[in-house]
Each structure stands twice: as structure tokens, then as C-alpha cells.
């Protein structure tokens, strides 16, 4: 009985602290809005800047910051991202072809947040699965990270998945198999770092959405007869390839 009472007291105190914190954040936002309005009336802030500060884009950012600090970090980040993109577009302008990719990407992002926010399994558990058999690698990292070193005399590729997580794979002691060798990497809000021999020829054929790979290698040492093709998708993620 005493334990249950202590738990109830703890939950009550935690809820009270969250409520106080939310009120504090909201109060600071209101004070800042009033101060900016006062500065505008005093002529300190010019009209063009005032219109940007009190725009609907900035309102999204403020709501996002409030959500980020109070209860919903995922949706807070989404609102900040959307408001930030439209605010930058309002100030500097973006070409039309940018929005052809940006809007679908934002829709995909919202869908991903909805999926992971509603899934208790993915939101509470970290998953890291590794398998290496017959010179093929299988690596899965979901809300987790992993680090592995591979040894093989006939490496043929494999598959790597990183969702809100990452993996570091050391292939520096690996010898490629003859023929076509493909490594499929899927990164969604995650990343993968590969360390490969300096003479490997890395060909990247991945589809990137607000992400990609960074090559940290000396191209002068590459042997075209030792080629590893990297395929897959990078959405709001990516990684690096180094030697």
C-alpha cells in the first residue's frame, strides 16, 4: 500500500511539473510576442521584418518549438521543419522544381511520424539484428546502433537497413567476389558508415530524398576491377564511405 501511494505521489508531482513547464514556455512565448509588438510600435523593428516575424510560417515554428519542449517531440520537429522551409522560401525564394520534390517528401515525413507515433512496439523497443552467412551481410538497426567488422575472402554484398538508427560496418579486411557485387542500403532517418579498402571502386546508385552519401576516399587509388555497387534509398538520412 505504501509503495502504491509513493507511486501515485510521484506521478502527481511529475504531472504538476509538466504542467508548470508547459505554462512557463507558453508564458515566455507570450512575453516575446508582446515585446516584439512593442518594438514595432516604437519603430525599432521595420515593417518587412515585422511581417516575417508575425507570419503564419513563424507561427508554425513557434507551435513546433512549444510542442518540442512540452509533449510531442516528433510533431514539434515536423512543424518546425515545415515552417522553416516555407519561411526560407518566403525570404529567398525556391525554384519550382524544388517544390516538386519537397512537398511529396513532407507528406512522406508526416506519414512516417504517424506510423511510428502510433506504434508502441517501435517507439519503446530498440532492434538490432546482424547476420553474416555465405559472404552476404544482413544488418537491421531500428532505434538502435551497431558496429561490426567483417572478414571474407569472397564478399558479394547484402542488405543494410537503418531506421532512426545507424550502423558502422568495417569492410577493410574484405576481398570482393568476382563478378557484380551489390550492397543494398536503406536509410530512413538513419545512417550507415562503411569503411572499405582503398582500392575498391564504389559506385553509388541509391535514390536520395534529403540525404545521401559522403565519399571520404582518394579516387587515385581505385581499381575498377574491384567494384561494389551501392543501391537502395536514403530518406532524411545517409552516411559516409571511407578508407
Image (cartoon, grey):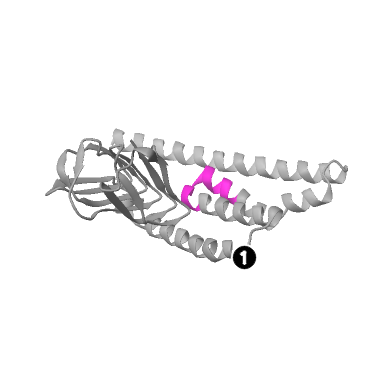
Residue 107, placed above or below residue 144: below
Q: Quadrant of residue 114?
A: bottom left
Quadrant of the image containing the C terminus: top left
Looking at the rendered structure, the number of numbered marks drawn on it comes to 1
Q: Quadrant of residue 179?
A: bottom left
Where are the magenta residues, as a range? Answer: 63-75
> Residue 138 appears at what percent x and percent y?
21, 50
Question: On the image, numbered disc 1 is attached to which residue?
Answer: 96
Secondary structure under the numbered disc 1 in the rendered image: helix
Residue 14, placed above or below residue 100: above
Kindly report the secondary structure that dominates the magenta region of the rendered protein.
helix
Task: Tell me which residue sits at (56%, 43%) in the image.
Answer: 22
The answer to whether 206 appears left or right of 31 in the picture is: left
Task: Tell me which residue sits at (41%, 50%) in the image.
Answer: 189
> Residue 222 appears at what percent x and percent y?
33, 42
Give 64 or 222, whichever is nearer the viewer.
222
Give 121 or 154, whichever is nearer the viewer.
154
Examine the structure image and report whether residue 87 is included in the region drawn in magenta: no
Quadrant of the image containing the N terminus: top left
Task: Tell me which residue sits at (88%, 42%) in the image.
Answer: 42
The answer to whether 60 appears left or right of 116 in the picture is: right
Task: Tell me which residue sits at (47%, 50%) in the image.
Answer: 74
> Residue 43 appears at what percent x and percent y?
88, 43
Give 234 or 215, whichever is nearer the viewer.
215
> Residue 200 appears at what percent x and percent y?
29, 43
Q: Residues within 10 Å of mark 1 (few under 14, many from 20)?
A: few
Amino acid at each position: 500500500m505504501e509503495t502504491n501511494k509513493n507511486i501515485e505521489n510521484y506521478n502527481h508531482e511529475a504531472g504538476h511539473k509538466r504542467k508548470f513547464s508547459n505554462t512557463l514556455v507558453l508564458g515566455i512565448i507570450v512575453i516575446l510576442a508582446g515585446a516584439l509588438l512593442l518594438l514595432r510600435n516604437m519603430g525599432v523593428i521595420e515593417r518587412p521584418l515585422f511581417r516575417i516575424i508575425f507570419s503564419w510560417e513563424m507561427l508554425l515554428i513557434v507551435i513546433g518549438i512549444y510542442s518540442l519542449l512540452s509533449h510531442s517531440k516528433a510533431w514539434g520537429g515536423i512543424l518546425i521543419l515545415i515552417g522553416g522551409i516555407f519561411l526560407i522560401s518566403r525570404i529567398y525564394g525556391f525554384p519550382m522544381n524544388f517544390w516538386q520534390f519537397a512537398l511529396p517528401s513532407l507528406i512522406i515525413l508526416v506519414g512516417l511520424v504517424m506510423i511510428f507515433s502510433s506504434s508502441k512496439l517501435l517507439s519503446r523497443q530498440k532492434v538490432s539484428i546482424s547476420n553474416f552467412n555465405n559472404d552476404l551481410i544482413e544488418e537491421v538497426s531500428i532505434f538502435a546502433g551497431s558496429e561490426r567488422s567483417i572478414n571474407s575472402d569472397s564478399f558479394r554484398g547484402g542488405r543494410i537497413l537503418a531506421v532512426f538508427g545507424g550502423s558502422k560496418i568495417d569492410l577493410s579486411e574484405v576481398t570482393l567476389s568476382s563478378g557484380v557485387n551489390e550492397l543494398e542500403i536503406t536509410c530512413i532517418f538513419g545512417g550507415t558508415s562503411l569503411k572499405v579498402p582503398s582500392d575498391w571502386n564504389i559506385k553509388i546508385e541509391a535514390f536520395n530524398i534529403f540525404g545521401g552519401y559522403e565519399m571520404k576516399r582518394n579516387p587515385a587509388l581505385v581499381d575498377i576491377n574491384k567494384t561494389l555497387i551501392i543501391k537502395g534509398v536514403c530518406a532524411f538520412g545517409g552516411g559516409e564511405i571511407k578508407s
